[in-house]
Amino acid sequence: MSLSLFIAKRIYRDTDGGKQVSRPAVLIAMTGISIGLAVMIIAVAVVIGFKNEVRNKVVGFGSHIQISNFDALRSYETRPIVVGDSMLTALAAYPQVAHVQRYSTKPGMIKTDDAFQGMVLKGVGAEFDARFFREHLLEGEIPVFNDSVSSNEVLISKALATKLKLKLGDKIYTYYVQDDVRARRFTIKGIYQTNFSEYDNLFLLTDLAVVNRLNGWQPEQVSGVELQVRNYEQLEDITYRIATDTDNKTDAFGGVYFVQNIQQLHPQIFDWLNLLDLNVWVILFLMIGVAGFTMISGLLIIIIERTQMIGVLKALGANNFTIRKTFLWFAVFLIGKGMLWGNLIGLAFCLIQSQLKLFKLNPETYYVDRVPISFNLWFFLFINVGTLLAAVLMLLGPSFLITKIRPASSMRYE
C-alpha cells in the first residue's frame, strides 16, 4: 500500500470517528455528492420512463412500421393496397420483424340522442396483436376480430364513452359520408383508456370485414399493413431494408406501396421526446457542478485544517505530489460514501414510485397519470462513473494549494 493511500485511510478513519477533521466540511462534501447523484438518477429514470410510456402508446396504436398507399398519406380517408397472404408471409420472413397485421380505416361520426362525435373506425383482422389494448382495458373484453364476417362489436375509449354518455353493452349508431350517408350499428364490447388523448378521442376498433365493406373494397384490399420489430434501436435500418424491397411497387389495382416508420409518421411527437434528452443533460451538468463545488469547498476546508500535518509531512521528506495524492484519496473516500447515500436515495425513490405510484400527473397534459420510472443499468453505471471522475478531476485544481504551504510556517499554524 502506498504512503499516500495509507495516510488518507487514517485521516478518513479519524474523520469517521469525529476526530481531527471538522464535521461540517465532511458533511458539506458528502451532502453535495449525495443530493446531486440522487437527483441525476431520479431525473434519468423519470425521463426514460416517460419517453418509453409515450413511445409505447404511439406504437401501440400504429405499430413500428406501416406500409400504405402513397396516394393516401396522412389521411384517414385512405386508398387501398393489396395485401395478400403471400405478402404477409414475405414481410414476416424478415428476421427483424416480430409481427405483421392488416388494418383498414374509415372516418365517420357517432351520434347519440344528446350528442355526436367525429371518429375513425379502424378495422383489424384475426392476426391483430391485442396486447397493448388488453393492458389498457378498463371494462369488458377485447372483441374477437375477423376479416371475413362481422361481429358488429367495437372497442371504444373511455374518453369517447364519457363524452357521449355511453357504457358497456350499449348500442351505438355510426354514420359515414360517401356518395350518400351510410349507417352502421355496433355494440360496445370493451372500453379502454390509454390517456393518450390524440388517439383516445379518435379510434374505435372493430372487424376488418366491416370497414372494408364500408369502403367498398375487394377482399385482399386494405388501408395498409403494420409491422412490429424486435429491436426498436434498429428501426431505421429495418425500415430502409423493407422500403428498398417494397417502395414504389404497384399492386394489381394500381395502388403504390409506401413504407414509413412511426417516427416518420409522427415527427412532432418524437422531436418533442428527443428534446427531453437535452433537459437530462442540463440536469446532469448542473448536478455535477453542484456536487463538484461542494467537494471543492469541503477539500479546501480540510486542507486548511490539516496545514500543520502537511508541514510535518514535507519536513519528513514527502513531496507535493505525494501529499496531493493523500488528500485526493481522502476525497475519493468521501465521494464514495456520498455516492453510496445518493444511490440509496435515488434507487429508493425509483422503487417506491414504480410500486406505489405516489406522484400523480395530469394525463390530459402529460399522456400518463403518474410519474413513470424506467431503470436502465447502463445509464446508472454511466452516472456513477461519470460523477466519480468529474468530482476527482474538479479537485485537482484546489489540491495545488498544498504546494504553497511551507513547512516552517505551517508547523506553527494553529
Image: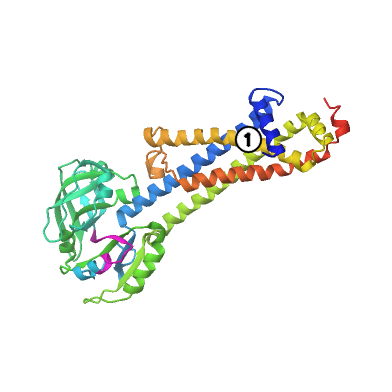
Answer whether residue 194 is magenta in the image: no
* Residue 222 picture quarter: bottom left
Left or right: 383 with respect to 128?
right
Please, is residue 209 above or below residue 192 in the view? below
On the question of residue 177 being in view, the answer is: yes
**Is residue 77 visible to us here?**
no
Image location (x, y in percent) of residue 321: 76, 43
Q: What percent of the width, then of the height, locates residue 315? A: 84, 34
Residue sitting nearer the eye, 84 or 297: 297
Q: Taking 347 as reference, is 111 above or below it?
A: below
Quick check: 404 above or below 236? Answer: above
Q: Nearer the viewer, residue 159 or 387?
A: 387
> In the rendered view, would you say 303 is above or below 108?
above
Quadrant for the C terminus in the image: top right
Nearest the viewer among 35 and 216 is 35
Residue 143 position, x and y percent, is 17, 49
Q: Which residue is mark 1?
A: 333
Question: Callout 1: 10 Å neighbours few (<14), some, many (20+)?
Answer: some
Name the spot of residue 84 as percent of width and height, x first. 20, 69
Q: How is the image coloured?
A: rainbow
- Tell me the residue at 50%/42% (across/down): 43
Query: Which region is colored magenta?
Result: 90-106
